[in-house]
Amino acid sequence: MKQEDPKDFAQAPGDRLTRAAGKQLAIYALAAVAVLVAVMFVLNALAGLTSSAAGMSRMAVDVENNIITTYLRDEPPQMNSMLASDAVSGMVLAHVMEGLLRYGPDDELVGGVAERWQQEGNTVTFWLRDDARWSNGEPVTAHDFEFAWKNVLDPAVGSQYAFILYPILNAEQANNGEVPVSEVGVDAVDDRTLVVTLQTPIAYFERMVAYHTYLPVNEEFHRQTNGRYGADADEMLYNGPFMMTSWVHGASMQLEKNPYYWDAERIRLDGINYAHMTSDASTLLNLFKDDQIVIADLGAEMLEEAMLQGWTLNQFMEGTVFYTDFNHRPERLTSNLNLRKAMALVHDAGELVNRVIKLPGYLPGKSLFPVWLPGAEETFREEYPAQEYRRDITKAKEYLQAALDELGLDRLPPLVLLTGDTPVSRIQAEYYQEVFKRNLDIDLVIDAQIFRQRLEKMTAGDFDLVASGWGPDYNDPLTFGDLFASWNLNNRGRYSNPALDAQVRIAQSSLDMEERMRAFGEIQRIIHDDVIMLPDYERGYVYVTHPQVRGIRRHVIGAETDFTNAWIDAGE
Amino acid sequence: MENNPVIRRLRPADLEPLSSQSAAPLLVRPSRSYWQDAWGRLKSNKRALVSLYLIIGLLLFTFAGPLVWRVDPALQDIDQISVPPGADRGAMVVDPFVAWDNVSLDDGYQGGTGLSLAGDPTTQSVRLHWDAIPGASGYRVYRNNYPTQDADALGLPLLQINNTQQMYYEDRLDLRAQTYYYSVAALDESGQLTGDYESLQADVVRVITVNEVRARDLSDNPDALQPGDQVRLSWHPLGTDYLGRDMLARLMAGARVSLFIGLLAPLFFVAFGVLYGATSGFVGGRFDSVMMRFADFVVALPFLLFMILFQVVFGIGPGESGIVPMLIALIILSWPATARLVRGQILQIREEAYVSAARLLGASQNYLILRHMIPNTLGVILVTLTFAVPAAIFTEAFLSFIGMGVAPPTASWGSMCNEGLKTMLTHPHELIFPAAMISITVLAFNLLGDGLRDALDAKMRNTE
């Protein structure tokens, strides 16, 4: 191979070349920077143009236009009230739509489109007010409700929340395709009278009617949208306090006061600007600090600063109950009552919440029924206080020994704890792993899964213990009470007890509130005695609001953050 | 050549043989092997030497550390959660906690003093009771870390009471030995603040019960302890994490996982890469180009996607560690760089004159490989290895950070960083320590690799 020294070869011309190339390169670089700067200026100017064109304010509170700016936790999948199953859609729907009944500022049931209503046996009659209007000026009629409800129950529509209409006569059968939808017990007698026939008389139907699946839909308009109903701001008709004027998918949403709303005087804001769609706590806190949004939830690490800044902090109990469910299928070890009792005697929800999770707003769990649920007179938990296990390691070990004897084992094999992938559920799982290991020598294997995967495994029964949560759909203890009924598909541990089933039947069918509450009290006792699950906590939030905005409400049922009663206090 | 002065002056004596001369200058120095030479150069490189000591220290920390610091890394010290290093450990012994569900006013409290404390405020609980505030139809209890000045900023809301019967509250939420400012504010019918409130200062004392002292083995003679005695809680030199686990013990446990991956994976993939590259380079020709195209194909595989696929294929079940699939994925995906390097080196050496000469002299293939190829590529391989170690440690930390590595309660530096990140603002030590360990280790291995490359570079030989 011929060897050549490349250095000698290219030395002289290379020197000249690099100098010239260097000069050229510097000129290119300068030009590139100049172009970039120019582009940035242009983009900035454009951004300013578009935002002012859309009437957006850069501040959280626009006193001049009477508009507030806030955020949505997520992009709503769609705004079709018949299909919506998520909290974000539910929240926006509560602002732009109104059903027969709605919840007032203090969670009391008040008339919405219905002026008055009456239940006699299994017939419920709603009389609609004549000034309720759609946002195109047409009146809201009883036919709009009949159409929407029957549409929800149509098996071809496939609404996930169709079950919430099941108290209505033939609703379940129609949804399963056994009878035609026309057989469903909803009948618009005339434009202003809606008669609902129930399967059996129940006492809590009016509480369910406030749920967003019961909202009306204008049939004529729905037909015109060709299946795109609720997909965009102009693909919907509104009958609520506000109407959606723009919806930039994944980015923002603007609501404007609805001039056709029958009770428009009640609404004091002229518009709500959902300018951000994010659920990241620190982003939201920064937006709040920059005066870009009027409300923000606070994480534990932000409280110190919030106290230092002297912000007004509020607490909101979200209404969801979190608990550790056992797998009661007979082939599982957790179907053994003594084992469950042993674990219950080690479990300490107070320690979990106060020492480990440490998030303000969380309440130690004591029962399946959260504290806010209404009873007959007072709240349910005041009428029927929850029974609790106190930590007692000695007794727990005795129960464990009894369980081992019954099972014929020397030592328990590891148990699988199915849990979510959120920070709180991971901390909780690691804490349980250590607590049960140290006190009972039970090994827990943590199976952390994303929500959908976890749901799949829960349904398949692929767990021994599972961290579960249950949020209410309506304002009655039954929304929790039937959770462990043997026929309930959400009873993931497949617990089956005729005594509990009997109580659920009473709670479902009785019209006497006292009797129903007694049944729930009995259910609560069975859950405790049989250790069907271990209550962990009730979730709450600490949040901060803009000092100029008053009357923001947060509801357990309906709109989680409700601005319909809010107003701007420009006095300061 | 007639005018060459040297030839012209040549005399017959010049052609005489030389007699033995004792005065001939002798320039000799001890013969040094390649490795001795390299070691000498490495020793004179301060940075590399310090890195070497750091790595030795790290190995001691990992393997000898747990023998000295005998603390279970999974043990949760519920009394000391997220405690920074050097925190006060004194605690007062008290009676076991009894819930305060009903107002058992056994401290002689008769009412009339407004908001006041029932019993001493301790980390077990702070008990408040108050008199009815006129016009109130409910109360909200607040806790503040700063003195309360404004009715709008009373601090952290703890509980809302929607009736007027309950005029007591027991706070147990994450109490620490510090001063809190409690307030009780009156609510109107609709649950809004009326503006009336009362405040109170509480200096919380850290306490522990005798049972807890016994369970945590804090005293030699727990039975002799009386309420009011002082004990010292267990010592955590680097503080504790969000579940009260000892940071030092966890760092040591985490180091094992990190070094396991960090040393084993490079060892395997460098070994495979060397074999692959050497074969390819030595055989050459069509075989070489086919093998190298395959290496290119492997380079093109996305690492993260492969990791996830591996976890699926391996059927990594719940609670099982993802370390083995991570190791295998690292090996399978990281060898081509070494292979390419070694192939290039072999191709170069194959054309060297001394190899041709050896061939000409009839040297066998084995001799060529053992005598010329391997020793001449060893330097390159060693340098690759030292650079591959920090890369692998970093990959492990990264994968554990995004939750694809070890399963709890096993710790690794990456997963510790991931957990520490969540409390970065309030308890920075939970993030700083593992992050510092990763940084120092990676830096030390990189600097050592740098030094090795300089030391092993044959071209720098004898240039001191």
Image: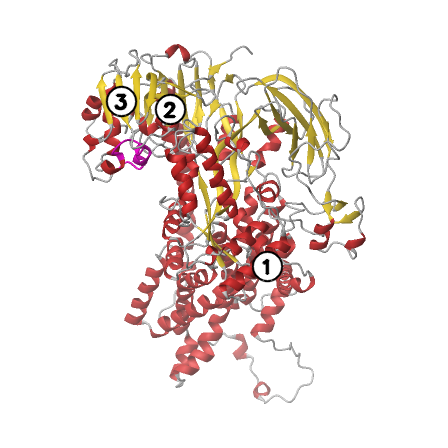
Image quadrant containing the N terminus of chain A = bottom left
> Disc 2 designates what residue?
A94
Please tell me whether mark 3 sits on a helix, a strand or a loop: strand
- Tell me the amino acid under the disc marked 3: Val
Cα gap from disc 2 to disc 1, whole angstroms: 52 Å
Please tell me whether mark 1 sits on a helix, a strand or a loop: helix
> Disc 3 designates what residue?
A195
In this rendering, the label closer to the viewer, 3 or 1: 3
Q: Nearer the viewer, residue B221 or A270?
A: B221
Question: Magenta span: helix, strand or loop, mainly?
Answer: loop
Quick check: marks 2 and 3 in contact, CB under 8 Å? no
Residue B401 to residue A182: above or below: below
- Tell me the amino acid under the disc marked 2: Ala
Please tell me whether mark 2 sits on a helix, a strand or a loop: helix
User: Dot 1: within a 10 Å radius of its alpha carbon, few (fewer than 14), some, or many (20 or more) residues?
Assistant: many
Q: Chain of mark 2?
A: A
The residue depicted at 79 percent of the width and 45 percent of the height is B227
Quick check: marks 2 and 1 in contact, CB under 8 Å? no
Cα gap from disc 2 to disc 3, whole angstroms: 24 Å
Q: Is residue A96 visible?
A: yes
Quarter of the figure with residue B337 = bottom left
In this rendering, the label closer to the viewer, 2 or 3: 3
Quarter of the figure with residue B273 = bottom left
Residue A514 to residue B292: above or below: above
Cα gap from disc 3 to disc 1, whole angstroms: 69 Å
In the image, is A572 to the left or to the right of A207?
right
Q: What is the magenta range?
A: A158-171
Image quadrant containing the C terminus of chain A = top right
Residue B325: image location, x then y, percent: 43, 61
> Disc 1 designates what residue?
B253
